[in-house]
Image: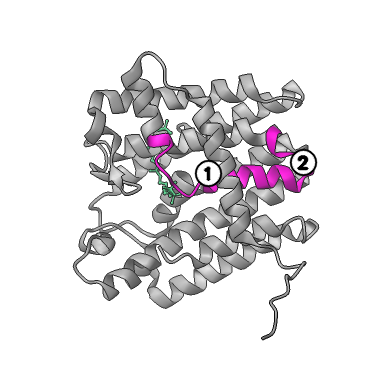
Amino acid sequence: PQEKVAEPHKFDFRAFMVAKAQAVNLALDKAVPLQYPMKLREAMRYSLLAGGKRVRPVLCLAACELLGGDEETAMPAACAMEMLHTMSLIHDDLPCMDNDDLRRGKPTNHKVYGEDTAVLTGDSLLSFAFEHIARETKGVPADRVVRVIAHLGKAVGSEGLVAGQIVDIASEGDSSVGIETLEYIHVHKTAVLLEASVVVGAILGGANEDEIDSLGQYARCVGLLFQVVDDILDVTKSSAELGKTAGKDLLTDKATYPKLLGLERSKVFAQNLLAKAKQQLSIFDQIKAAPLLGLADYIANRQN
Ligand code: GRG
């Protein structure tokens, strides 16, 4: 039988993703030790260590390494990205927002610890993310660290995640929501944090302005792609397994790409976003860019 020969030029994206996610999980575990007050710390660790694909921290590490920086340099920021993402999920799941019982296959934070603790858990993770970057980032000039902190503050605040969330809430049940508002919501709720992950990694890795610009555009395309694919999967999944929760958005007035563009045009839109994302990486060495190219493919082709 023919022996399988390793292909030296073929980048093993799965192995890369698993290795980086493991490193991030270890660092997160270390960053938030269990201590007094126990309930709060337990609740922080419950959501932070509950699994999740770790897309944002991996993007951050990959961008830093693309610029020649090393993993340790970007690890505190990578952990901070996951803390910010996690706190946004905890607050998003609250009864006053989406009122969800399950997250990452487990009961949501407020279901386990109560609403009061869930709010405070989110607050703690939000504040700790910034403290962690400021305290733990080593070997990077202070002006770069300050730039990272400013970029992240903007990304999660009233020009970023919070803006996306409030427009989303305001457009609930509004059947007149058009493609522009839908795009605003997705850009602010999802793309902004993916973009920040890449830009922060790039800044820490010593990128110049052109490189930061290209990587930011790459991540915005990937962020929007993420949501378009989500909407498409919702339709394809729900027709495959009608009646299950996967297609719940179809039963509500929530605007989605397939609803506004149709399924076929949504798929074309997704393919164009993937091509545009990859195009932004053409200024880099393609072998070094393999992790980010792989991440774009991974997001475009995911099945759930
Ligand atoms: C940030 C201060 C502050 C407040 C939060 C609630 C809120 C404001 C924003 C909501 C943001 C939100 C829930 C966006 C959706 C993001 C998204 C695409 C989640 C799914 O991400 P995955 O697939 O999830 O990466 P895993 O579980 O793999 O990490």
Residue 238 lies, in percent from the top left, at 28, 69
Q: Is mark 2 within 8 Å of ligand 1?
A: no
Q: Dot 1, how many residues are within 10 Å of its Cα: few (below 14), some (14-19), or many (20+)?
A: many
Looking at the rendering, the stretch of residues picked out in magenta corresponds to 47-72
Residue 96 is a magenta residue = no
Q: Secondary structure at mark 2?
A: loop
For residue 212, the mark is: none
Nearest to the observer: residue 181 or residue 61: 61
Q: Quadrant of residue 41?
A: top left
- Residue at the (55%, 24%) spot, across then down: 130
- Is residue 159 visible to us here? no
Residue ranking furthest to the top: 36
Residue ranking furthest to the bottom: 1
Q: Is residue 164 above or below residue 258?
A: above
- Residue at the (58%, 59%) spot, across then down: 14
* Principal secondary structure, stretch drawn in magenta: helix
Nearest to the observer: residue 62 or residue 147: 62
Residue 60 lies, in percent from the top left, at 62, 42
Nearest to the observer: residue 272 or residue 21: 21
- Residue at the (55%, 71%) spot, across then down: 271
Label 1 vs label 2: CA separation? Answer: 19 Å
> CB of mark 1 within 8 Å of CB of mark 2?
no
Q: Quadrant of residue 196?
A: top right
The residue where tag 2 is placed is 207
- Taking 221 as reference, is 65 left or right? right
Hey, what amino acid is under mark 1?
Val
